[in-house]
Image: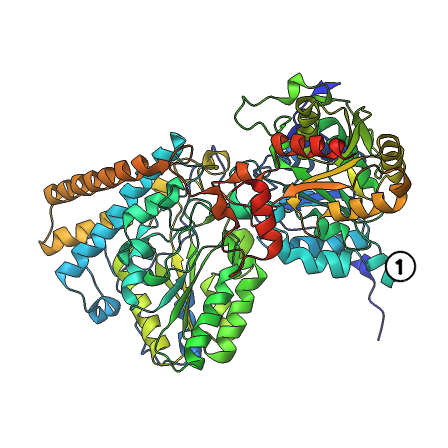
């Protein structure tokens, strides 16, 4: 075990994968010599050479498109989009190409590629450095979408994503890079080194895609969430006095319905929580699945707490962010329904 | 015909370009060919692009080492001593403003800042070639356009501090200014997306039979984006009245310009495949920038179509307050940059003309600093990022649509604003 930040854990995953498999290549904007603007690839070029870890021109469509070509050839590209907010020029390559290569060629060509991108707000990044576009990926058939909430999962999930035979969108909550964040922005920041999930096993291990995990056991309600919001939900459960069960989905697609159903059928109440905007967000899918699968166990309508349906504002970041106060209030209302 | 036997060839290998020097090395710009000032010809504005292909591979320069404005581009400049002094003042204002705002960011009065150090001439001079009604589509490093257009520094500071007087109501990242009145299109923060929009704006002027032109702005790194190429093909096809500006400051965060430029000799040469007249100019030479911008604006106004300009310059500071360039380039590189400092060069020209002196320069610096400091005090008294007055959080829900739809009204109510 070693103490790591999420940045170090992600870097370690790529290091392990590159060391074990010469077909793993890493590239993106500022990724090579400098090691990425968040330093997730620092040292990889020096260790593995500049044909396995390199800087690209600023063209996200090019980064993903070239990655698809390499993946189809037989390499395993792990590409970085500098911010999830910069992903849109690559969207056609992701949606029309990466996601469908296997289907339309009946398996002749496949795309075992990972597209990494920092996601979410909480760093005063304004509307172009704060977005959470996961629903734009979960809506696309042929993609898998992963959002880790801590260093230990991040490493294991990234290794699983790299080994997966299909394209995986790997979204890294940037507010969690250096420490857990429960939404109390006015309190001192905490570091991963004092958190048990900052303990990261050395060498190779995987956290399987499609497996959620219970972060807090409870009887009164279930919170379905992922990424930064896992920590917000845990804080809200303590502060609301509602004995909530908190499920960290980890992988949005494929989704671990078994864990979700077991919990919601037990508690009878469900809160869906994400930082992304509400309307047509991934929470809508979760709410629909829960009402369809757990209808006869539900004692209250499924509730959603999410980012407001506005662009991510700069000054009013903390009025926008669905912090622990909003989540706690929603939990209290959820358990008050007779 | 025989099938080729690949085994007769050596194995392939990937070529990844690298800058000449990295931290620890000696900066070397000997590969940057710099023609003497005044030696590059000035063609007529209706020239056939085929006849000036060489102008994409040279550097148009006006100010020589002795501080004289020389050559055909200087002769075509219709500029008064008053204009020159104004130009110098704009650049000095931008530099001092940058220094103050950088410092304010270090004091946590704002979340973020991006400075222009070494690149002041480009935006300050370019704006003087435009007329009211023309529109810039700037990137985050062209605040000189606003200063030269007379936009109030107080409004710029209020935007940096996201206070209640911020014209963007605290919604945008600092430096993402917007002023329709001053010909400054709202900065998106994404890269290259607005390069093609400038072409659309210019096409709209032509469709409408107006007399307005537009200017697109992009950095060397972002020319790699697909939107850059979209802009070139649209501008070429419709002969849009647009000036396509590439600011080549050598570095895209940590990535040297060779990664975006690839096998092309220069960024200006990108225009050749589209039949667009393409010029390369000394971006640290206020008069050269102004002369070339006026030439391109004249072409646009005469309905002769687009012009592509590459400004050769150097980003002397970090990419932003989040960046530390010493991690990827030698610290001495900015002083080794052979095109000099734009403010110093224009200052020396004014001294050579006998209309300026070191004393007057120092006095002007003190005056500008005093004025900016005074304005900053007032802006800070209104509010900074974490203190004072800010726009109401209720405002967060405004302007998503012209009319607030029911679901947003409901959310605003739920938010308690």
Residue shown at the point (23%, 47%) measured from the top left: B344
Residue B42 in sight in this render: yes
> In the image shown, does B111 or B285 lie closer to the viewer?
B111
Q: Quadrant of residue B368?
A: top left
Residue shown at the point (60%, 34%) measured from the top left: A39
Q: Quadrant of residue B73?
A: bottom left
The x and y percentages for residue A81 are 64, 47
Q: Is residue B70 left or right of residue A189?
A: left
> In the image shown, does B215 or A262 lie closer to the viewer?
A262
Question: Considering the image in quadrants, where does the N terminus of chain A appear?
Answer: top right
The x and y percentages for residue A53 are 66, 42
Q: Is residue B261 left or right of residue A98?
A: left
Secondary structure found at label 1: loop
How many labels sit on residues? 1
Question: Considering the image in quadrants, where does the C terminus of chain A appear?
Answer: top right
Residue A50 in sight in this render: no
The x and y percentages for residue A264 are 85, 34
> In the image shown, does B340 or B220 lie closer to the viewer?
B220
The residue indicated by pointer 1 is A108
> In the image shown, does B311 or B175 lie closer to the viewer?
B175
Whether A290 is drawn above or below B243: the answer is above
The x and y percentages for residue B417 are 51, 42
Q: Is residue B247 left or right of residue A267?
A: left
Residue shown at the point (51%, 68%) measured from the top left: B231
Whether B97 is drawn above or below A61: the answer is above
Q: Is residue A291 left or right of residue B251?
A: right
């Amino acid at each position: 075990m070693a103490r790591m930040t999420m940045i170090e854990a992600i870097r370690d995953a790529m290091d392990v994968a590159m060391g074990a498999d010469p077909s793993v290549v890493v590239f993106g904007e500022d990724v090579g010599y400098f090691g990425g603007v968040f330093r997730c690839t620092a040292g990889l070029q020096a260790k593995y050479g500049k044909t396995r870890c390199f800087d690209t021109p600023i063209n996200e469509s090019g980064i993903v498109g070239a990655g698809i070509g390499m993946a189809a050839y037989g390499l395993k590209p792990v590409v970085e989009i500098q911010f999830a907010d910069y992903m849109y020029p690559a969207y056609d390559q992701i949606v029309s190409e990466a996601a469908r290569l296997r289907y339309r060629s009946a398996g002749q060509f496949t795309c075992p590629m990972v597209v990494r991108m920092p996601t979410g707000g909480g760093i005063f990044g304004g509307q172009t450095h704060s977005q959470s576009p996961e629903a734009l990926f979960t809506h696309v058939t042929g993609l898998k979408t992963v959002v880790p909430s801590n260093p230990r999962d991040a490493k294991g999930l990234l290794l699983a994503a790299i080994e997966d035979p299909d394209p995986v969108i790997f979204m890294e909550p940037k507010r969690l890079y250096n420490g857990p964040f429960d939404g109390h922005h006015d309190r001192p920041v905490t570091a991963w080194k004092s958190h048990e999930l900052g303990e990261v096993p050395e060498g190779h291990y995987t956290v399987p895609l499609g497996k959620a995990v219970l972060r807090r056991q409870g009887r009164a309600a279930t919170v379905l969430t992922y990424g930064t919001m896992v920590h917000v939900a845990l804080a809200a459960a303590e502060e609301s006095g509602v004995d909530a069960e908190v499920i960290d989905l980890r992988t949005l697609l494929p989704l671990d319905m078994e864990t979700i159903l077991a919990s919601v059928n037990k508690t009878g109440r469900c809160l869906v929580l994400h930082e992304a905007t509400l309307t047509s967000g991934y929470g809508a899918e979760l709410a629909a699945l829960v009402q369809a699968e757990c209808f006869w166990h539900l004692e209250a309508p499924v509730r959603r707490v999410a980012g407001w349906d506005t662009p991510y504002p700069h000054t009013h970041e903390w009025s926008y962010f669905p912090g622990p106060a909003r989540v706690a209030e929603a939990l209290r209302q959820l358990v008050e329904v007779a | 015909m025989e099938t080729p036997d690949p085994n007769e060839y050596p194995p392939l290998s990937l070529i990844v370009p690298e800058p000449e020097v990295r931290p620890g090395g000696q900066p070397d710009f000997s590969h940057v060919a710099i023609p003497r000032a005044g030696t590059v010809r000035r063609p007529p504005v209706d020239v056939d692009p085929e006849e000036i292909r060489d102008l994409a591979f040279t550097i148009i320069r006006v100010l020589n080492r002795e501080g004289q404005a020389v050559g055909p581009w200087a002769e075509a400049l219709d500029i008064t001593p008053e204009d020159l002094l104004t130009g110098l003042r704009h650049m000095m204002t931008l530099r001092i403003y940058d220094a103050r705002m950088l410092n304010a960011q270090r004091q946590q009065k704002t979340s973020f800042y991006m400075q222009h150090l070494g690149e002041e001439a480009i935006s300050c001079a370019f704006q003087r070639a435009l007329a009211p009604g023309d529109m810039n589509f700037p990137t985050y490093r062209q605040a000189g356009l606003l200063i030269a257009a007379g936009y109030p520094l107080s409004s710029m500071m209020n935007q940096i501090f996201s206070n209640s007087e911020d014209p963007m109501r605290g919604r945008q990242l600092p430096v993402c200014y917007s002023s329709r009145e001053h010909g400054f299109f709202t900065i998106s923060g994404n890269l290259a997306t607005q390069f093609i929009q400038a072409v659309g704006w210019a096409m709209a002027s032509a469709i409408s039979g107006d007399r307005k032109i537009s200017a697109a702005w992009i950095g060397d790194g972002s020319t790699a984006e697909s939107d850059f190429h979209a802009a070139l093909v649209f501008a070429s096809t419709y002969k849009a009245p647009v000036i396509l500006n590439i600011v080549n400051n050598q570095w895209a965060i940590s990535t040297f310009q060779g990664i975006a430029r690839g096998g092309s000799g220069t960024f200006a040469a990108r225009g050749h495949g589209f039949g667009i007249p393409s010029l390369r100019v000394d971006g640290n030479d206020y008069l050269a920038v102004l002369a070339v911008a006026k030439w391109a604006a004249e072409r646009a106004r005469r309905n002769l179509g687009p012009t592509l300009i590459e400004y050769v310059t150097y980003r002397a500071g970090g990419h932003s307050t989040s960046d530390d360039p010493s991690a990827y380039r030698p610290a001495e590189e900015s002083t080794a940059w052979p095109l000099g400092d734009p403010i110093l060069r224009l200052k020396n020209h004014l001294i050579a003309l006998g209309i300026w002196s070191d004393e007057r320069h120092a006095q002007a610096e003190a005056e500008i600093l005093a004025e900016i400091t005074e304005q900053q005090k007032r802006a800070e008294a209104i509010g900074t990022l974490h203190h004072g007055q800010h726009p109401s959080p209720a405002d967060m829900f405004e302007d998503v649509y012209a009319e607030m739809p029911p679901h947003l009204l409901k959310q605003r109510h739920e938010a308690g604003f």
